[in-house]
Amino acid sequence: MKDKVNPVYLDKVKQLNADEAERILSRMGGKLPKRFIKEKLSQEEALALQLEIEDEQLQEWRDKVAKLREEDEKRDKKKKD
């Protein structure tokens, strides 16, 4: 897990309202909640790390979906030929 918090995500955290922050905190997984609870991370740092993790996961998902769509298009094209 990354120990340094990206300043871009800290800026995003500062723009969140309390409900949005709570929703993001509720999605934390792995070691992040333990570090937050033991006060090794501030709430802002934990939120920033979670946002960064979610952005990375979203990009990975988008890449996988794009690859699947390409494979489907190739398969459909072969069927037409």
Image (cartoon, helix red, strand yellow):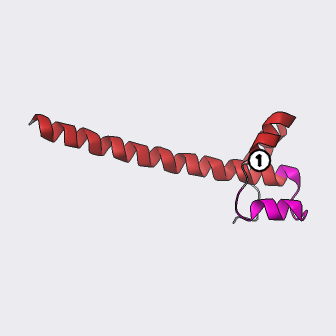
Q: Residue at x 43, y 49 (%)?
A: 64
Q: Residue at x 79, y 59 (%)?
A: 33
Which residue position holds label 1? 26
Residue 44 coordinates in the image, percent (x, y): 85, 49
SS for callout 1: helix
Residue 68 coordinates in the image, percent (x, y): 35, 45
The answer to whether residue 42 is left or right of residue 58 is right
Q: Quadrant of residue 14?
A: top right
Region of the chain picked out in magenta, as a range: 29-44
The answer to whether residue 61 is left or right of residue 41 is left
Residue 40 lies in the magenta-colored region: yes
Type of amino acid under label 1: Ser
From this viewpoint, is residue 81 visible? yes
Residue that sits furthest to the front in the current view: 26
Vertical placement of 50 versus 35: above or below? above
Q: Quadrant of residue 34?
A: bottom right
Residue 63 coordinates in the image, percent (x, y): 45, 47
Vertical placement of 29 versus 11: above or below? below
Q: Quadrant of residue 81?
A: top left
Name the image quarter holding the N terminus: bottom right
Vertical placement of 49 versus 38: above or below? above
Number of numbered markers: 1
Q: Residue at x 80, y 54 (%)?
A: 46
Residue 77 lies in the magenta-colored region: no
Q: Residue at x 74, y 46 (%)?
A: 9
